[in-house]
Image (tube, helix red, strand yellow):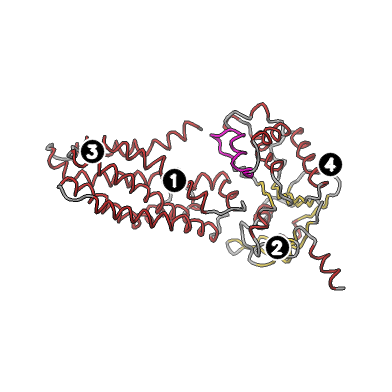
Amino acid sequence: MSILSLTKFNDKVLRVENLAFERNERTIFSGVNFFVSEGELLLLQGRNGCGKSTLLRILTSLIKPQQGLVSTYGENIYADRHKYLSNIIFIGHQLALKLALSPLDNLYWTASSTRERQHIFEAMDEMGLSSVSGLPCYRLSAGQLKRVALTRLILSDAKLWLLDEPFSSLDLSGVSIIEKLIERHLKQNGSVLMTGHQDLRLSNIRKIDMTIWCH
Amino acid sequence: MARSTFEATIAPIVFMCMGVSLIPLALPPDSASHSSIAPGIVWIMVLLASLMSLERIFTFDYEDGSLEQLLISPQLLTQPIFGKLVAHWVMTGVPMALASPIMAFVLSLPADGYIPMILSIVIGSAYLSLAGSVCASLTVSLGRGGFLLPITVIPLYMPIIIFGTATIDFAISGMDWLFPLAVMGTFLCLATAICPIVVAAIFRSTPLF
């Protein structure tokens, strides 16, 4: 029994057990349990302020929870943090773009160093950004900036994508581009954990409503 | 945006030159009394100008999410932090050293003091950026315009104002000014070795978000 169940237990890209978090002596959420498998998209839903972004930050190891365990393939993410971090990409509400630089320069310093400039051009073309690649970012609209930040998904090798409301401020064509990216990533056995309020036109989605854990 | 970056870079130097140009107006009009206090005035202005720019090292990165991405990137944190500090010194300390002859002229500093002054500001401002970054990293999540940063950073700045002033004083009075400059160099070496590691440890261990 043991070996079989152990491998089954350890094959999850991400497993969260009994997680609790409090801020300023107020419990934001507690008893959080879920997992993300390979090739699967988990959509976290819930009302505003129920701690979706905080939960994502905990999963990136930026915040330490007061209670509970976050593990990847059966191993605590803090055990080999370097290995875990090289396997994830997180894109939140703050886009980490320098407004004085062009999209190209921004992507150049955040994308991993092995990438060629040509590769970044191709990725930006896929995101519909080829016409603005040389403009400084302060000339770009909110939606275009979001697209620039999301271009990192194409340039990254990470298996697990942690996306905090990736569709906010995107137009319809932007949404469908991201949906395509996610679909391709899932087909390559990657995993996505995202928050959002929209319904997606994708298969292999599991939805979790965070309200059950909120206080 | 490009304009605001430019303004933020040039602001400490403008502040420094304006402050110094007011000093002779407030003092008795003989150049002898000016030149005796000139080393002190120059270094106080360098210190205050450096304090002004200190907040910018990490606050912008904290606000736009770059710091967050830096913390979750699978690489050593000390290297990019050291790079940021070198950049900060090049953008603030070096221009201050280049602008300092203007201040020295306004305060009628004797000619012997010019070279030691420039050298002491080049070395001293690098120390100010490094030591200041420790306090800047501690207070980054408190937002801009806080008073905690100046309060915590002033004790770290004290040795530099003592030896920086001494370098110029020694040069004016014909003594060997390389000695206080060497002490400043020692402080700089220590800070270079320790500060990036301390800042990285602070970012890793404090709850920023």
Quick one: which residue is furthest to the bottom in this view?
A: A1
Q: Do tags 2 and 3 sit on the same chain?
A: no
Mark 1 residue crowding within 10 angstroms, few (<14) / some (14–19) / many (20+): some
Q: Which of marks 2 and 4 is in front?
A: 2
Residue A70's tag is 2
SS for callout 1: helix
* Type of the residue with mark 3: Ala
Q: Distance between the residues labelled 1 and 2?
A: 37 Å
For the residues labelled 3 and 4, the Cα–Cα distance comes to 69 Å
For disc 2, the neighbor class at 10 Å (few under 14, some 14 to 19, many from 20) is many
Residue at 68% across, 54% down: A56
> Residue, x 47% and y 50% (percent of image)?
B82
Q: Is label 1 in contact with label 2 (beta carbons under 8 Å)?
A: no
Using the image, determine if residue B3 lies above or below residue B96.
above
Q: Which of marks 1 and 3 is in front?
A: 1
Report in which chain the residue with disc 1 lies.
B
Q: Which residue reaches farthest top?
A: A131
Determine the chain carrying the residue at label 3: B
Q: In the rendering, at what x and y percent does residue B116 appear?
A: 25, 44
To the question of a shared chain for discs 1 and 2, the answer is: no
* Secondary structure of residue under mark 2: strand
Q: Which element carries disc 4, helix, strand or loop?
A: loop
Q: Mark 3 sits on what residue? A: B104
Badge 2: chain ID? A
Assess whether residue B69 is covered by the magenta stretch: no
Quote the CA–CA distance across marks 1 and 3.
26 Å
Assess disc 4: are there few (<14), some (14-19) or many (≥20) residues with their C-alpha within 10 Å of its C-alpha.
few
Mark drawn on residue B86:
1
| Dot 3 crowding, Cα within 10 Å, few <14, some 14–19, many 20+ | many
What chain is tagged by disc 4? A
